[in-house]
Image: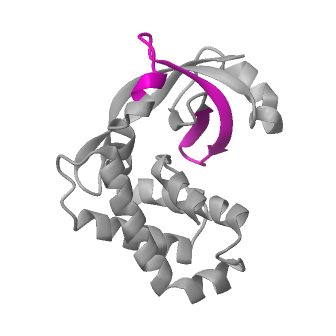
Amino acid sequence: MRIFIILLSFIFTLPLLSQGIIDEMAQLTCECMEAKDLKNKSSDEITNIMTDCLTQHLIKNITAFEEELNIEITDQEAMQAVGEKIGSKMATICPNIIMAIAGLSEDFEETVDETNTVSGKITSITGTDLTTLTIQTDYGVMVSFVWLGSFEGDEALIALKSKMIGTNVTVWFEELPIFNQKDGTYVPQNIITGISIN
C-alpha cells in the first residue's frame, strides 16, 4: 500500500486508458486537493496531502474498487499498476497539482544538468494522441517527458519497439508551458528535444 502511494507522488504524465473507478478515484482525489490551500507548500507537503485525499476516498470506495478491478487491496504489484493509472488520470484532471509536486522536487533538480538532460531507465511509454515517456533516474526519481514531435535519436528509439521498456537513455528536453483548458492556466511540461540510447 505504501509503495502505491509513493508511486503517485512521482507520476506526472498525461494519458490514461482506464475508465470507471480509476477515473472516479482520480477525480475525487483532485477535487479533495483543489479544496486545500497548497500555496507555499513544499513538494513533500503536497504529496502528503495527496496521500491523505487518496486514502480517504480509497477507504470509502474499497468494495467497488476491488470488485471492478478484480484485485485485492493488499496485492502490492497490482496496486502499483493501478497507482500509475490513477496518477496519470490525475495529470489530465488537475495537472497543476501534479506538476507542482514535480516542479518543487529537489531530487528532480539534482538529476538535471546545465544542458537540460536527464539519464535513466525507461519505465513506461503511454498515450494515443499525446505520447509520454517516463524514465527512472539513477536517483530513483520518476520523470516524464512529452514526445511532441520528431527529435534527434527518435528513429533508434522507435526501432526498439517492445524492447523500449528497460532501456537506459539520456533525454534532452525543453520545458515549455502547455495550456490547460480546464483551469485556464499554463502548465510546464518537459518536451523531448533529443534522446541517446546508453
- Residue 194 location (% of width, % of height): 57, 17
Farthest bottom residue?
A: 63
Does any portion of residue 111 appear in the rendered image?
yes
In this rendered view, identify the residue nearer to me: 59 or 89. Answer: 59
Say left or right for 80 vs 38.
Answer: right
Does any portion of residue 85 appear in the rendered image?
no
Say left or right for 46 vs 22.
Answer: left
**Residue 156 in magenta?**
no
In this rendered view, identify the residue nearer to me: 52 or 20. Answer: 52
- Residue 52 location (% of width, % of height): 38, 68
Query: Up-down: is 24 above or below 145?
Result: below
- Residue 39 location (% of width, % of height): 17, 50
Give the residue at x 49% y 77%.
58
Residue 92 location, quadrant:
bottom left
Say left or right for 189 vs 181.
Answer: right
- Residue 30 location (% of width, % of height): 35, 65
In this rendered view, identify the residue nearer to me: 153 or 5. Answer: 5
Magenta-tinted stretch = 109-136
Give the residue at x 23% y 48%.
41
Query: Up-down: is 197 above or below 16?
Result: above
Query: Up-down: is 84 above or below 185?
Result: below
Give the residue at x 74% y 37%.
165
Figure coloring: one colour
Q: How many marks?
A: 0
**Residue 135 in magenta?**
yes
Residue 167 location, quadrant:
top right
* Image quarter of the C terminus: top right
